[in-house]
Amino acid sequence: MTVLPLVLPGTLGEQLARIVDVEEKIPRAIDALAPVGGRDVILLASDGGRCAAQLTALGARVVPLEALDDAAAVAAPADVVVSLGAAFRGPDTANLVADTAAADRLLRPGGRLIVMHDYGRDDVSRLRGDLPEYGLWTRRDGPFLRGGFRIRVLHCWWTFASLDEAREFLVGAFGAVGEAVAAELHRPRLSYNVALYHRDRPGTLGGA
């Protein structure tokens, strides 16, 4: 599962989907923050079905949406809204307030919103360069924490079958930067930290 949209050429995107979070820490953490069993879950910016399948396996009734603007397609409010990152992009205060209000309209009172983004401070951030997700967004004075969200950080991995596979993928996907990171690998995995920003819609969620 990739948190941010990351367009890779050819089969590299499919390979990325296979090697990210093979331990499935992300769906388990979602379930810990907002138990999904027997509940209606809206999944924003689906990653091709992997996260939907994982949450369904945990008992969720998943409704995929490409964006918050597709709210009219939702027949009824949900218990949980999960954004994989394409929503809530560039959350300055005004945008975050608007996006959060739009997500609240998708939620039942007391429902929980979970927004996932890369956190940084890991091997993967060396590949991706300087992103706002790695700095301002994670701080107490950043838009999420100042806007009433809490944060849970997951320490995940990109896991390869071998060092040779890791090097081939990193060079093919990230060029010279990937080659430099690959040259320093001593095991076939990269550290990958994920931020889960979460907040409740005001109200009471029955059965929680």
Image (spheres, grey):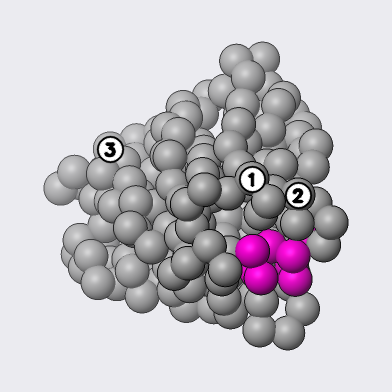
User: In the rendered structure, which disc, 3 or 2, sits on the residue that comes first in sequence?
Assistant: 2
| Mark 1 lies on residue | 184
| Mark 3 lies on residue | 204
Q: Is residue 123 above or below residue 20?
A: above
Instruction: Name the secondary structure under disc 1.
Output: loop
Dot 3 alpha-carbon crowd within 10 angstroms: few under 14, some 14 to 19, many 20 or more: few
| 91 left or right, relative to 17 | right
Q: Nearer the viewer, mark 3 or mark 1?
A: 1
Report the residue at 64% width, 64% height from top: 167
Q: Main secondary structure of the magenta part?
A: helix
Residue range of the region highlighted in magenta in the rendering: 167-174
Look at the numbered discs 2 and 1 and tell me whether their residues touch, using CB distance below 8 Å. Answer: yes
Estimate the spatial distance between the alpha carbons at disc 3 and disc 2, rounded to whole Å: 51 Å
**Residue in front for this viewpoint, 8 or 55:** 8
Instruction: Name the secondary structure under disc 3.
Output: loop
| 123 left or right, relative to 108 | right
| Mark 2 lies on residue | 180
Report the residue at 45% width, 34% height from top: 153
